[in-house]
Image: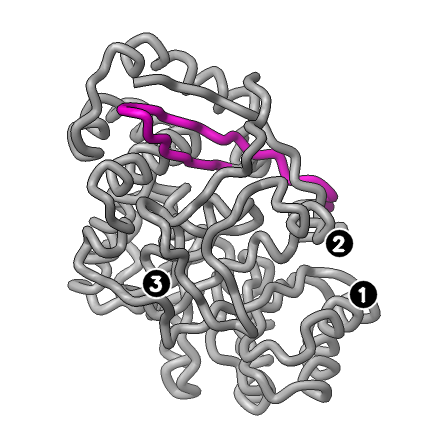
Amino acid sequence: MKLKISRRDLPLRHVMTVFRGTISVIRTVVVELEQDGLKGYGEAYEDQHWGVTVEDMVNQIESYREVIQRYAFADPFAFNRLIQNLIRKYPYAATALEMAACDLWGKLHNMPLRRIWGFDGSSSALKSSYTLGLDSIYRVIEKFKEQPNWPLYRVKLGSHEDMTILRELRARTDSPFRLDVNGCWTLQQTLEYLDELKSLNIELIEQPLHQDDWEGMKRLRKECDKYGIPLIADESCRCERDLEKCVGFFHGVNLKPIKFGGLLPTKKLVIRARELGFKVMIGNTIESVISASATSQFVPMIDYAYIDGPLLVDPTLMGNQKFGRGVELKDGSIVFSSENGIGYVAPSKAVERT
């Protein structure tokens, strides 16, 4: 099996502000695995908040080059056993590699990954939200105007203008809002907001309190039960053992594959989350259509999806197919790619090797 590693810079449509900082370019690592004339692709993004850099991911994957290139690929389960230490220690790097293995698996079997998992169809009733990044009121409204008819918005919050932003958005659309607070609110703040949040048609709140504020979450969940507003764990659910810990504190969990080392580890957790009574959210943050297509394979088995990452990248790059094609969003509807594996088709001109 051949291994190729590439780096990609994804300039954003807009400078994006989150409570951790401001970014204008997302750097990602793309892995290509080739066997029997077929190629599988995977992707992972740099996340400096958690100390994950492109350079580190490249080095971590490179450390497996020799063993991978001697390996005769049969299925991703055996492959994951081969890279189990990488999955455990470096889940971001492992996700790019494992995603490529799952893509190759589907192509070797002439089927989309979701069909191998027992699902089919060209589209889903589940809608993808569109993300409005944290910004000034004026800038958030300008971003909203670019997609004014989207059926569902994911609003990033974490400033003193949060409620004003929500009021201004609500004056312009009836679409439900999903809030992603990244742990920026205090318990008292959130309790004070609940009455108005209910009136503003808030569908859910993702990670309202700091990831370690379990006592606050316990009290907040009881209050949110009264309002019918689900609470979704993200930063509080960073690894497999955190899933059980979230029971009784959250109504659901965000199971982004990059947190758990790939698609198959995430699928295992989706099944376990269901057993524990959780609602399940899966998204792909800001990455190219590679990661979005891979994430879309989970859509038939989850409750909430956000695979709008490619829409947040500079549209001039997406328009010329520089990064290939795959899953599409049409007014929020998720249209699966008909291609095998994760549904991604690479551009005709290959990206350069690192």
Task: Say whether marks 2 and 1 touch (CB < 8 Å).
Answer: yes
Q: Which residues are magenta?
A: 22-44
Q: Which residue is mark 3?
A: 299
Crowd tier of the residue under label 2, counting other residues whose Cα lies within 10 Å: few below 14, some 14–19, many 20 or above: some
- Provide the major secondary structure of the magenta segment: strand
Q: Is residue 346 above or below residue 307?
A: above
Residue under label 1:
139
Quick check: is 29 in the magenta stretch?
yes
Residue found at x 56% / y 53%: 309
In the picture of the structure, the residue carrying the numbered disc 2 is: 14
Element carrying mark 2: strand
Residue at point 26%, 55% (across, down)? 114
Which secondary structure lies at badge 1? helix
Percent position (x, y) of residue 257? 37, 46
* In-front residue for pair 23/67: 67
* In-image side of 354 versus 104 (left or right): right
Total labels: the figure holds: 3
Which quarter of the rendering shows the C terminus?
Answer: top right
Q: Which of disc 2 and disc 3 is earlier in sequence?
A: 2
Q: Amino acid at mark 3?
A: Val
